[in-house]
Image (tube, grey):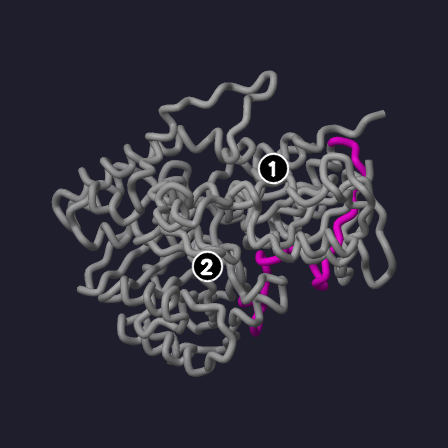
Amino acid sequence: MKVVVAGAGVGGLAAAVRLAAADHRVVVLERAPRPGGKAGRLELGEGFRFDTGPSLLTMPFVLRDLFAATGAPLEDELELLRVEPITRYRFADGSQLDLSADLPVALEALEAWSPGTGADWTRFLGVCAGMWRAAVPFLTGPPPWPPRRPRPGEAAPDPRDALRVRPWHTLRSLARGCTRDPRLRTLIERFATYAGADPRRAPAALAIAGYVEHAFGAWHPRGGLYELVRALVRRLEALGGEVRCGCEVQGLTVAPGRRHALRVTGAVTPAGVETCDGLVSNLEPEVTRALLGAGAPRRARERLAGRVMPARVRGTAAARARAGVRPGGDPSVSGLALMLALRGRSDDLVHHRIAFPADYDAEFDDVLVHRRPAREPTVYLSSSCATDPGEAPAGGENLYVLVNAPGEAGQDWAAEEERVLDRLAAVGWDPRPRLVARARRTPGDLERETGATRGHIYGQVAPHGRLTGSLRRPGNRSPDADGLWLVGGAVHPGGGLPLVMLGAQIVARDIGAASG
């Protein structure tokens, strides 16, 4: 079976590797000049290197399984370095906390910082451990909605799992139920932003995004996260697959289908049609649907254009309103990123730092409600040279800065860049006296470079709603056409490097091994 993969992000490459290992003929088509998608790479000046997308790796066992199942082990391709402490948090009152994945170290730091928070953190991690047990079948299997009978060999769902994920809680109410110190609550609420969401409206299950850092550690591939992209390309090519960069998928060719009205038969590119027996799209679901509609008969185009979200997550307007879901869904978060090459390197430098504002709610209101840059944003900083000294020259620092931002056009990003630098100066982390070179990446840049609609980092729709937030992502098998599968952060099981690789595994398992 010949499979075309549209998009060479990590999800698309992981699916391509697994399918090639299953003896399919695989071609990956990528419109950008190099693979990686949102996992980009930039070099400034002499030897300052930056990952422009994900800045850490969690759940390393997912990556190890991918490489072990497709050939030589991960250690033959990548060296993973442990990031410790995971993050240094700075709060509006000026206090700081270094939080480790080593639980005894973390508890000691918490008790020294605020007596009683060690017990609160232990309580929170215990709740998350139950959520994790419930989440594993969800993350590694098909979407839970609509419900279906288990296939032969599959375990029946455990009804207790529905309670373990605390569906009656938002992330905020969970944080308030587990912790007494408002600063620790803010730290927990931040995990909603891993999915581009507002903790006041996000499901409690998003706590798992932060839990896995502390349960399984935070990791950095030596040479940067982009080395993961290179390793996946090498593995794919070793298995006989191919990556064609600078080759944009402009449409999909279709024929009458069996299960659906349409069946995908190829990808339209500037060089012509790349025919296939199946297609895996690492593009956003809305983009994939538009490409499918371009080659469909008129009636099918009208149906596809009218489908604002997959049928599996439709419901009555009243039910959706009760769940806190707007028609079409709430827009997700984008971001403004700065890459700063700095002279000098602090002795106490850590890989990740975060500075919280005095009013966290005001930030979410600005970005997600009023759709404007936050007046006082949370600032996330990553200096990978703290863990991997080769990421910056001796005596230098590669500082990556990210703030939440709306994806709307028309923003004065140059002014916002200066405001972010002012914010860093206000918390005592002013980089301007040490600047050697700098670059800026706006939501518009992200859209142009990766195709992410309006520069959304985590998919267009935020996972809001206590009961439905985790169920609303499209599934991995397209409901619109036969022979069409979906991977990436905007579809099941979610965003982040390990989850898009798990989605690739789900797709490869669904397609199966090549026959004959």
- Image quadrant of residue 183? bottom left
Image vertical order of residue 372 relative to residue 303, above or below: below
Depth order, front residue of 345/34? 34
Identified at 67% across, 42% down, the residue is 485
Q: Nearer the viewer, mark 2 or mark 1?
A: 2
The residue beneath circle 1 is: 74
The image shows residue 515, relative to residue 267, as above or below, that is above
Q: Secondary structure at mark 1?
A: helix
Q: In the rendered image, which quarter is residue 403 located in?
A: bottom left
Residue 504 located within the stretch drawn in magenta: no
Q: Relative to 345, is 229 on the left or the right?
A: right
Q: Confirm whether residue 81 shows in the render.
A: no
Residue 159 showing in the rendered view: yes
Task: Indicate the position of residue 368 as horizontal and vertical percent values.
Answer: 39, 64
* Residue in the picture at 59% in, 54% down: 226
Give the x, y percent position of residue 464: 39, 51
Does residue 25 belong to the magenta stretch? yes
Q: Mark 1 is on which residue type?
A: Leu
Q: Position of residue 146 (x, y in %)?
A: 52, 34
Q: Is residue 375 above or below residue 159?
A: below
Q: Which residue is identified by label 2?
A: 332
| Label 2 – label 1 distance at C-alpha | 33 Å
Q: Check the picture and name the quadrant holding the C terminus.
A: top right
x, y percent for residue 49: 55, 64
- Residue at point 54%, 49% (across, down): 489
Residue 57: assigned label: none
Seen as rendered, the residue at the extreme right is 272
Residue type at numbered disc 2: Ser
Give the residues in magenta.
22-48
In this figure, what is the number of numbered marks?
2
First of labels 2, 1 by sequence position: 1
What secondary structure is marked by label 2?
Answer: loop
